[in-house]
Amino acid sequence: MRLTRQTNYAIRILMYLATNPGRLSKLGDVAKSYAAPEPFMFKILQPLVGCGLVETVRGRNGGIRLGRPAATITLREVVVLMEESFAMAECFDNGATDCPLVFHCELNVALRQALEAFLSTLDQFSIADLVENRPFMSETLGIPLHAEQSALS
């Protein structure tokens, strides 16, 4: 299974925001840190805002921030939100197929178990887990540390 580019960047947006806690971030800065086009990042941001993972603040000094604590946002939640399909074979989830074995094959059972194992593993990791090394993350992404964050490091 391969995650889409949109899912990859959705996770990156959340990681950026988790690395910049308590402050608003500009989407342009997030896009720049990942060398991604801002319109592409804006498109990815929409479902994250729609389900409450990200909040937007309008106005001249507005920006974006996490809608919930990073420790409560699992990778599974983000992947399930962003991926359009988990069909690993044309017969997965009763897809159209001309395979004569479709109703007598254990491939779907095996694929469903594999998918559930994959998603269960993702459920064990939060966005906070991905950014535990905040000073390194901040430096890499070009996010200046607040004085109180520096004291914690």
Image (cartoon, rainbow, N blue to C red):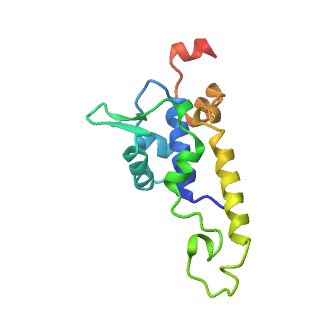
Count of number-bearing discs: 0
Residue 83 or residue 35, whichever sits in front:
83
User: Residue 145: horizontal and vertical position, in percent?
Assistant: 54, 22
Quarter residue 135 falls in: top right
Left or right side of 85 for 63: left
User: Residue 100: horizontal and vertical position, in percent?
Assistant: 68, 87
Quarter residue 149 falls in: top right
- Which residue sits at x=42%, y=33%? 65
- Which residue sits at x=50%, y=18%? 146
- Which residue sits at x=72%, y=76%? 105
- Which residue sits at x=42%, y=43%? 28
Residue 2 or residue 111, whichever sits in front:
111
- 58 versus 84 height, above or below: above
- 110 versus 145 height, above or below: below
User: Residue 55: horizontal and vertical position, in percent?
Assistant: 37, 37
- Residue sitting farthest toward the left: 59
Q: Can residue 34 be seen in this view?
A: no
Q: Is residue 18 visible?
A: yes
Q: In which quarter of the image is the C terminus?
A: top right
Residue 90 or residue 53, whichever sits in front:
90
User: Residue 95: horizontal and vertical position, in percent?
Assistant: 56, 76
- 73 versus 9 height, above or below: above
Left or right side of 50 for 110: right
